[in-house]
Amino acid sequence: MKSLNVEVSRLPNGLTIATQTMPHLESTALGVWIKSGSRNERENQHGIAHLLEHMAFKGTGTRDAWQIASDIENVGGEINAATSVETTAYFARVLTENVPLAIDILTDILTDSKFDADELEREKHVILQEIGAAYDTPDDVVFDRFSETVFRHQMIGRSILGTPESVRSFGSGDLHDYIHTQYGADRMTVVAVGNIDHADIVREVEKKFGDFRNKASAKSPAYANYVGGDYREDRDLMDAHFILGFEGRAYHARDFYASQILSSILGGGMSSRLFQEVREKRGLCYSVYAFHWGFSDTGVFGVHAATGKEDIEELIPVILSELARASETITQEELDRSKAQFRAGLLMSGENAASRASQIARQILLFGRPVPADELLERLTAITTDRLTDLAGRLFSESKPTVTGLGPIGTLMPYDQIRQTFGSSPKKMARPAAQ
């Protein structure tokens, strides 16, 4: 299958291979993406997906940790990995002549990792330090508490890092069990972008991954259920952090791209409504932005602000007022500017091999195919100002809001008062007086 200059093949075991040729490049970005992340963990596995990603580089049956690092760096390459809520990725960037070596190393760590007990103890100690550093970073803590409140008592809402107790509990056998049950060819995609030939990549990957198990035995994660609510933690900090959230839209939902555009108009840059009204005109905070997280079965729309404790009482009504105003009017100028930003971001990311490889992999895992840029841009043409105001009215009134505060938040507006701002039906939001 070919989509523009993206070619896709599938091995007999179900493994998908996609490539995009960029003849002007000397290097190639490539990796293995697995449709399994932190939300795939069982109750007693909190943090194991992230620990597994760390341990992948700590030794195999043929290479120790030093050899993995030196083999790739001896040719000037780079190798890394990342864990998200729904995916895990292992990727490298090398000169094109060294692509077979990169594929060999990636195969080695995914099929023959030893998870040596001594290496495991050292890496667990590193992750415990990472957890401690995150706890000392208010930006990280407030988003962790926000996710926990949005998806209360669900895997999707838990911190990717795990807890000190859960991380300490894992042994080598737990990691072997997790990779064996979660990693199957049916959940895996290999993507390479650079000055490459598709047939060459398919041959190399098939030699290494052709015998990989066909299917992951673990069940798919439970369907996510947006809950919402209120979480507040008074801490002795210089700044107060505030997040207000609502149920968003999944990747496959009709309003997904409209939600992305709405978040950009409200708080996606220096020209956005929240930045202009809250920071530029009123000077009420140093950071404010809107975001929309899409998942395979749900989404979250939110606004984050960080401010001094003396300004939080005035700040919240202004944010609420701007959200209410979005359900009344969106200008064509705002819509055109946001569409231009989306288009530029999409096309610019396509000029970077690593970004493009990641983009192709995500699309295949989510939609079963690479989605051409023209098709994505066409979806923007269906978005109108009326559609955005209607979406805002529904988005901010159809779900229970999630409020998260961290720091000196004694004057933060009560939850019930915030909730009363948003009516129970679309377009029924009160406009709080913004002093």
Image: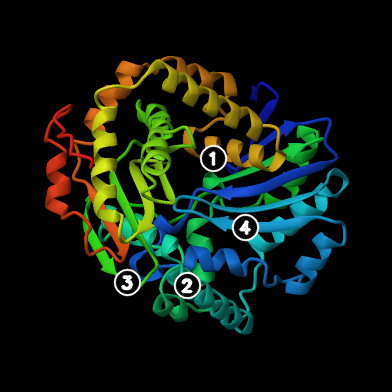
Q: Earlier in the sequence, mark 4 or mark 1?
A: 4
Label 1 packing within 10 angstroms: few (<14), some (14-19), many (20+):
many
Give the CA separation, mark 2 to mark 1.
27 Å
Give the CA separation, mark 4 to mark 1.
15 Å
Q: Nearer the viewer, residue 388 or 413?
A: 413
Find out whether the residues at labels 1 and 3 contact each other: C-beta distance under 8 Å: no
Q: Quadrant of residue 126?
A: bottom right
* Residue 235's disc number: 3
> Which amino acid is tagged 1?
Arg
Q: Position of residue 324 (x, y in %)?
A: 23, 33
Q: Residue at x 84, y 43 (%)?
A: 96
In the picture, the quarter occupied by the C terminus is top left
Label 3 packing within 10 angstroms: few (<14), some (14-19), many (20+):
some
Q: Quadrant of residue 345?
A: top right
- Judging by the rendered image, the residue that carries numbered circle 2 is 131
* Residue 81's disc number: 4
Give the CA separation, mark 1 to mark 3.
38 Å
Give the CA separation, mark 3 to mark 4.
33 Å
Q: Position of residue 288 (x, y in %)?
A: 41, 46
Q: Position of residue 330 (x, y in %)?
A: 34, 22
Give the CA separation, mark 2 to mark 3.
18 Å
Q: From the viewer's perspective, is 159 left or right of 184?
A: left
Residue 8 visible in image: no
In terms of secondary structure, where does tag 1 sit? Answer: helix
- Judging by the rendered image, the residue that carries numbered circle 1 is 362
Give the CA separation, mark 2 to mark 4.
18 Å
Find out whether the residues at labels 2 and 1 contact each other: C-beta distance under 8 Å: no
Find out whether the residues at labels 2 and 4 contact each other: C-beta distance under 8 Å: no
Q: From the viewer's perspective, is 150 left or right of 421?
A: right
Q: Nearer the viewer, residue 254 or 390?
A: 390
> Which amino acid is tagged 3?
Arg
In terms of secondary structure, where does tag 2 sit? Answer: helix
